[in-house]
Structure formats: structure tokens, C-alpha cells
Amino acid sequence: MTIYEGIQKAIREAMKAKDQKTLDFARVVKAELDRKGDGKPLPDAEAVKVLKALKEIALEQGNAFEAEFLDRFLPKEMTEEEIEAWIRENLDLSRFKNPLAAIGAVTQALGPKAPGEKVRRVIERMAR
């Protein structure tokens, strides 16, 4: 199930449960996804960016309910140790002119589970 489909399902479940708070926020999230996707479902990689931005706003405003709701749909990020293990198993950093050039390859392969800034820290540590 995609993130977009998960949000749609949450809307249906909130309607059945008569959970107005969840329904209202799920509709806000879906509207934002629709807006970013020009009315088409966003791919998960793009939807994650939208949800992370919404979560950051929710945390700044101290809204734990919204942050927890968004966490249900955000993929669990890999730890730096998991990223390093993946890189050691799947990439030869010596084939890159500069080890930092591998960031794109890693983030593309791992997607939203491995944010670029975390991958950068791991590669910088490994290159020392």
C-alpha cells in the first residue's frame, strides 16, 4: 500500500469510527498530497518529503497528535550503522573520484529510509 492509499484508508476508517479529529487532519494531509501531485497520487518518495515537512510544522507547534499521525505513514529511517553496513555490502567507494559522490547512489538505492544528510555523515566517517 502506498502512503497516499494509506491516507485514504485512514480517512475511511476515521469516518466509520466517527473520529472527527483524525478525519479532519487526514483530509488536510491528503489535500496537501493532492496539491503537490497536481491531483495525482504522489510517489512515496515525494509523499515522504511532504509528510516530513508537515511533521516538522506539527512539532514546531507542539502538536503531538499530528506528529504521531504522520509517523504512522513515514518509513522508519535506517540507523547510521545500518547505512554503513549496506554501503560496505553493496558499494565500492573507491570507484568514485570523491567518496561523497556516492551519496546520490546510496540515497537513490535506499530511498526515504536513508536521508541524504545521514548518508553524508556515514560516508564522511567511512572515508577518513
Image (cartoon, grey):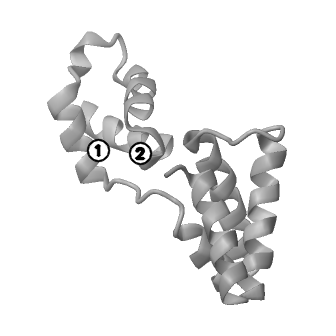
Residue at position x 22%, y 38% in the image: 86
Q: Amino acid at mark 2?
A: Ala
On the question of residue 128 being in view, the answer is: no
* As drawn, 63 above or below 110: below
Left-right relation of 58 to 125: right
Sequence-earlier tag: 1 or 2: 1
> Mark 1: which secondary structure?
helix
Residue at position x 15%, y 32% in the image: 89
* As drawn, 126 above or below 72: above
- Residue extending farthest to the left is 89
The circle drawn on residue 114 is 2
Residue at position x 57%, y 78% in the image: 68
Left-right relation of 111 to 34: left
| Closer to us: 4 or 62 | 4
On the question of residue 86 being in view, the answer is: yes
Count residues near mark 2 (Cα–Cα under 10 Å), then give few for <14, some for 14-19, many for 20+.
Answer: many
Measured in 3D between alpha carbons, the distance from the residue under mark 1 to the one under mark 2, in whole angstroms, is: 7 Å
Count residues near mark 1 (Cα–Cα under 10 Å), then give few for <14, some for 14-19, many for 20+.
Answer: many
Q: Quadrant of residue 101?
A: top left
Assess whether mark 2 and mark 1 are in contact (beta carbons under 8 angstroms): yes
> Dot 1 corresponds to which residue?
83
Rendered location of residue 19, percent (x, y): 71, 88
Rendered location of residue 70, percent (x, y): 61, 68
* As drawn, 127 above or below 21: above
Q: Amino acid at mark 1?
A: Ile
| Closer to us: 74 or 119 | 74
| Closer to us: 86 or 26 | 26
Dividing the image into 4 quarters, which one contains the C terminus?
Answer: top left
Rendered location of residue 99, percent (x, y): 34, 22
> Mark 2: which secondary structure?
loop
Residue at position x 26%, y 31% in the image: 127
